[in-house]
Image (cartoon, helix red, strand yellow):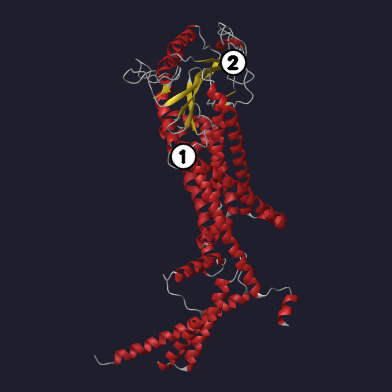
Amino acid sequence: MAEASRWHRGGTPKPNLHYSKEVEIRTTLQELALYFIFLINLCILTFGMVNPHMYYLNKVMSSLFLDTSAPGDERTNFKSIRSITDFWKFMEGPLLEGLYWDAWYTNKTLYDLKNSSRIYYENILLGVPRVRQLKVRNNTCKVYSSLQSLMDECYDRYTSKNEDLADFGLQVETEWKYSPPDSTSPWHWGFVGVYRNGGFIFTLSKSKSETKNKFIDLQLNSWITRGTRVIFIDFSLYNANVNLFCIIRLVAEFPATGGIITSWQFYSVKLLRYVSYYDYIIASCEITFCIFLIVFTTQEGQKIREFKSAYFKSVWNWLELLLLVLCFLTVSFNIYCNVQIFLLLGDLLKNTDQYSDFYFLAYWHTYYNNIIAVTIFFAWIKIFKFISFNKTMSQLSSTLSRCIKDIVGFAIMFFIIFFAYAQLGFLVFGSQVDDFSTFQNAIFAQFRIVLGDFNFAGIQQANRILGPIYFITFIFFVFFVLLNMFLAIINDTYSEVKADYSIGRRPDFELGKMIKKSYNNALEKLRLKKPEEDEDKKNEKGGDLVERARREGFDENEIESAKQMKKWKDRLEKKYYSAEIQDDYQPVTQQEFRELFLYAVELEKELHYVSLKLNRVMRKISTLPA
C-alpha cells in the first residue's frame, strides 16, 4: 500500500531510481568507449596525411629558390629583390640555374629521359614553368590639377576594374597578348592586393639556353612596365622517393608606391593517395570515419526528436552539432579533392611540353588539411564532456559557468580600451612602425605587448612624446589593471566553488565511482588487490569494537553516546556528500542549518569531554612518583 501511495503521489521508487542511474552511467561509459575508438581512428587518419618529408621538401626548395644569390652579386636573391633590375638578375641567375639541372656534379649525363629536368637530381620538374603578370591601365587615378603639368600618367593599385586587358609591346607572342582568366582558378591574396587568374602569360622552354634568350628578349623590350602590378612564377615538381608533389609559386608585387614586394608559397601535398600498404590502411580509416559519422548523426537525430527544443539548451549539444558539421565538410572536401585528382591528374602528367596547373589541386588539398585539422581539434575538446565526472573538471566548469556574466561585462570594458589604444597606435605610428602599419597589425602588436614582445625603440623613434606616453599608459591600464581584474574574477569565483564543494554542495560523481569500482573489481579478480569488506562485515567489526570498548571499562552511556554520534555523522555525510544535486547554487534551508548547528554543538561537547579526560589523566601522571 505504501508503495502504491508513493506512485499515486508522483514519486519514484528508490530501486528504480538507482537502476535508471546505473543504466545512464553504463550508457555514458559505452559512449565514451565508442568515442575513444572514433578519436583513435581520426588520429591515424590525420597523421597518415602528413609526414616530416613535406617540411624537408619545402625547406630544400625554399633554400634553392629564395636564398640562392645571383652570380657576381651576393646581396641579390629573391627575398632581397627591390627593383626591376634585381628581378631580371634573379630570373637569369638563381631561377634559371635552379630549374635546369642537365648533368651530374661530375658533368656526366644525368639521365636519358626526354627533355625533362630533375631539380637536386631527385625532383622531376612537371611540364614547364609559367610566368604571368597582371597590369593596370593608365589614368586609373586622378591627378590634382596643380600637378597635372608635372605628370601625365597615373597608375592606380590593382583591382579587377583597373586591370589592363589590352595587348601591348610586340603583340606577337602570348606574353604580349592578354589571356582571360579561368573561372575555376582561385584568386591569389597578396600583401598589396587580391589578384585573379589570367593576364599576360609565357611558358619557359625545355632548353636552358632558349629560356635565357627569352628573358633577355623580354628585358630589352620592356615587358615589365609602369602598369605592372604583380608577376607570378609557377611550377611543380614530383619526388618519387617520398611520393610528394611540391607546387611552388613565387610572387613579385609592384605596388603603386614603387619598388617590389616579394612573397612565396610552397605546397607539398600527396596527390597519389593510395600507393603503399599503409595508404590502404588510411583508406580503411576513412571508411570507418564515414561509418562513425553515420552512427553519430543518427544518435543526435534521435536526441533532437526526443528532447526537441530542450536539446539546444546544452553547450555540449552545440559542440556535437559543430563537430558533425565539420565532419561532413571534411568528407565533402575529401570527395571533391579525390574527384578532381582523378579527372585532372592524368591529363596534367601527359602534357610535358606545357604548363601543368597543379596549383588548383594543391589549393583545395590544403583547404582539406585545414578543415580536418579544425575537426580533430574540436574532437579532442569533446573529451571534456565525458570527463566532467572528475572533481577538478567539475570545479572548472562550475567556475566558468558562474563567472560568465562577469567575464562578458569585463570583456566589453576591456575591448573598448584595447581598440581605443589600437586606433591610437595605428594613427600615430602606422606610417613608420611595421607593427602598426595596419589596424589589424596594431591589434596583434598590442597582444604581443601584453605577452612581453614589443619594440619600444621603434615606437619612441616614431614619436618621442606620444610614444612613451602610449606605451606606459597601455601597460598600466591593460596589463596591471584590467588583466588583474580578470584574474580576480576567476579567483573569487573559484574560491566560492571550492567553498561550496568543501561543505558538500557538489554533484555526485557516480561515473567516477563506477569506473573506480570496476577498476578495483578487475584488480581483485587478477589477485592484485585484497577484496574489500562488505557492509555486513563492517557491521560485525563495529560490534567487535563495542565489545572491546566494554572490556576496556567504558560505561554504557559513553558507548551509546558514541554510537549516536556515529549515526548522526553517517546520516549527514550521506545527505551532503552522496545526494544528487541539480544546481550548484542551492541555498541552505533553515532545517539544514539547525541540524548542522546541533551537530557542531555535539562535537563541541565531545571535544570538551575528551579535554576533561586528558586533564584527569595528566593530573594522575603528575602525582606518580618519579
Residue 351 in which image quadrant: top right
Which residue is labeled 1 in the image? 448
Helix, strand or loop at label 1? It is: helix
Between residues 502 and 383, which one lies in front from this camera angle? 383
Q: Nearer the viewer, mark 2 or mark 1?
A: 2
The foreground one among 282 and 408 is: 282
Q: Is residue 192 visible?
A: no
x, y percent for residue 247:
50, 27
Q: CA distance from mark 2 to mark 1?
A: 38 Å
Residue closest to the far right: 8
Instruction: Name the amino acid, label 2.
Output: Val
Earlier in the chain: of badge 2 and badge 1, it is: 2
Neighbourhood count class around disc 2 (C-alpha, 10 Å): few under 14, some 14–19, many 20 upward: many
Q: Is residue 304 left or right of residue 195?
A: right
Along the line of sight, which residue is nearer the eye, 259 or 103? 103
Where's residue 228, x and y in %? 54, 15
Q: Marks 2 and 1: CB-CB under 8 Å?
A: no
Q: Is the residue marked by circle 1 packed among few (<14), some (14-19), or many (20+) residues within 10 Å? A: some
| Image: 603 above or below 395 | below
Q: Quadrant of the N terminus?
A: bottom right
Q: Disc 2 designates what residue?
A: 136
Question: Residue 331 falls in which quadrant of the image?
Answer: top right
Q: Position of residue 68 (x, y in %)?
A: 38, 22
For residue 169, say whether it is visible. yes
User: What amino acid is found at the position of numbered circle 1 in the picture?
Assistant: Arg
Q: Nearer the viewer, residue 192 or 19?
A: 19
